[in-house]
Image (cartoon, rainbow, N blue to C red):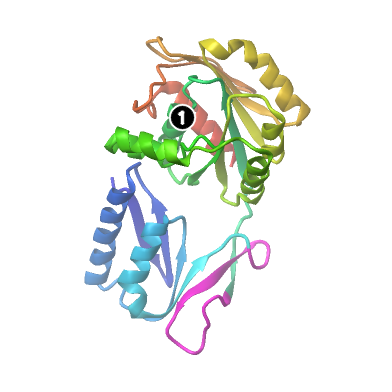
Amino acid sequence: MATYHLNLESDVLKVRFGKPANGDQVIKDAVVRLEKMVALGELSGGKSLKIYGPASVAVSYLIADKISHFYGTLAIFDPKIGRPGYKTFIIEVSQTPAYKIGELIETDEPHENKPILKVVLCGHLQSGKLCLREGLKQAISTIEGPPYPDVITAFPDGEGPWFSDSARRDSNLARRLKDEYKAKFTAEFAQKAAGWVRCASTPLNIIDISRKITEENRVMVGEATHAVILAGDRGKDDVLLWEDFWRDLNTPIIANLDSDYHGKDDKIVTKSPLLTGTVHYLARGEDVSSRPMVQVLARVLVGLV
């Protein structure tokens, strides 16, 4: 199974992520597919080509480099603009005076406006939030036709979404970069992170916040849609406090999980209306995407979208 998929339908290049992988492997799979499509005459050129679907920055550059010279224009889909309920594309490459870069192409093709999910992952120090977060991303990507899970790291400890992949490659480098990026938790940072959450526009967003219940956290997650509580041995006393925190914000809790570091298996107690139970051994560097609890939580999130 490829890590990135590209298929041409009429004048629209539909793209999406496949199985989980690092960015370098995604690029390798994408270039193989693009070159095959060119060799087979599928991407033979024309007046314009529209690109629809999620793409990393690296993949976007690759597509433009490989095929832009075949077409008069390249346009990418943007769900935030245009007529509600219809697909609108932005011209990103133009080699004809008929279109200018930044111009919009509005279509009559219906586009369902899906809800934007902003799920906050909260828990005590060493509860395994980072491990669960990465496992969720991978588990979601194995579900057929899932939304791409965007991650917002709403605390300034320097450990962004890049950290896990970097640590697997070079743990010393990842740790050094984390220490360099680490900053103080200030009111200014809280306002900036609140802006990230407010402006999140992808269908599924996972927001990772600091372990403490603070006014800064309240500011940052005021526009969250759902919450997941993860409590390790050191944080079990905080569960009631987190429940009160989300109740005050009128934010529904969709999962309340126990992180059992020394456990041997997951235990699912309830699935609905609240997912409860235990997820075991959330250790940094572990691939937990196939764990039963992680799989169930991934399906809950996709189902909400």
Q: How many marks?
A: 1
Q: Name the one closer to the observer, 227 or 111.
A: 227
Image location of residue 278, percent across then percent down: 49, 14
Mark 1, residues whose alpha carbon is within 10 Å: few (<14), some, or many (≥20)? many
- Whether 181 is drawn above or below 265: the answer is below
Q: Is residue 142 visible?
A: no
Residue at image point 62% right, 22% down: 274
Residue 29 higher or lower than 287, as above or below: below
Residue drawn at the location 64% of the way across and 51% of the way down: 199
Q: Quadrant of the N terminus?
A: top left
Looking at the image, residue 243 lies above or below residue 152: above
Q: Is residue 179 left or right of residue 223?
A: left
Tell me if residue 159 is in the magenta stretch: no
* Residue 161 drawn above or below residue 13: above
- The type of residue carrying mark 1 is Leu
Instruction: Please name whichever residue, 292 or 164, is drawn nearer the observer in this view of the structure.
Output: 164
Query: Which residue is the extreme one toward the bottom?
Result: 97
On the image, the x and y values in percent for residue 265 come to 39, 13
Q: Secondary structure at mark 1?
A: helix
Q: Position of residue 73 (x, y in %)?
A: 44, 79
Answer whether residue 100 is magenta in the image. Answer: yes
Which range is magenta?
Answer: 81-104
Between residue 209 and residue 117, name the one nearer to us. 209
Percent across and percent down for residue 217 are 67, 33
User: According to the image, label 1 marks what residue?
Assistant: 130
The C terminus is located in which quarter? top right
Can the viewer see residue 239 in this picture?
yes
Where residue 290 sits, quadrant-wise, is: top left
Q: Which quarter of the picture shows residue 222? A: top right
> On the image, which quarter does residue 162 sit in?
top left
State the residue at coordinates (34%, 52%). Answer: 4
